[in-house]
Image: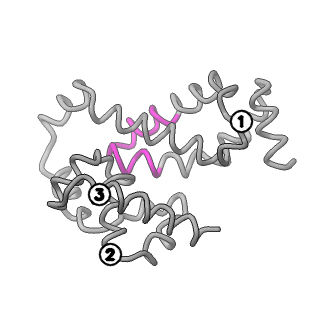
Amino acid sequence: MDLDNLVLQFKNKDEKAFEKLYNMYSDSMHGVIYNIVRDNTIAEEIMQDVFIKAWHKSDSYDVKKGRFFTWLINIARNAAIDKTRSKAFKNSGKNLNSDFFVDIIESQDNLDSSTDAIGIKKFVDKLAKKCIEVIELLYFKGFTQKEASEELNMPIGTIKTRNRNCIKELRASVL
């Protein structure tokens, strides 16, 4: 069955289509979510919530605006970022053991292997260093544009422009 028909059935609340799409995309979504929240249990929970949200809001997906996968990944990314900004999530990190922080420190300088769950690392690696820095912070680590501006010590306008231009370059390299 082709993807367009599968998505149409999903929008028509076909449970088998839901199951097939879940099996197709769950690993990729988990990788994106995990890279932001850094906790398997929370990533799994968010991923399931995202699929249920997509199921309930499937009528808002418009094939003319982009691919279904991109729509799902955006929902997942936003849900993960929302989770990290929640008070409960911030409080949960107060009593973590040092092993958790050592892992974070080791992976701060580059895209880690869970990023590649969606297969985009090979395309991102081909971009200029300035693009990799901005994309990594904004999309893989969940920074806001303001936070990325502070982290990279750049004006927010520069961050916005680089983001736009680098994403355009990334799209061109993927297509």
* Amino acid type, callout 3: Ile
Magenta stretch: give its range: 31-47
Which element type, helix, strand or loop, lies under badge 2? helix
Residue 109: assigned label: none
The part of the image, by quadrant, that contains residue 103 is bottom left
Give the residue displayed 28% in from the left and 48% down from the top: 145
Q: Nearer the viewer, mark 1 or mark 2?
A: 2
Residue to which mark 3 is pinned: 159
Q: Residues within 10 Å of mark 3 (few under 14, many from 20)?
A: many
Q: Nearer the viewer, mark 3 or mark 1?
A: 3
Residue to which mark 1 is pinned: 19
* Amino acid type, callout 1: Glu
Which element type, helix, strand or loop, lies under badge 3? helix
**Real-space Cα distance between discs 3 and 2?**
14 Å
* Amino acid type, callout 2: Lys
Q: Residues within 10 Å of mark 2 (few under 14, many from 20)?
A: few
- Give percent across and percent down for residue 86: 27, 27
Of label 3 and label 1, which has the lower sequence position? Answer: 1
The part of the image, by quadrant, that contains residue 18 is top right
Which element type, helix, strand or loop, lies under badge 1? helix
Of label 1 and label 2, which has the lower sequence position? Answer: 1
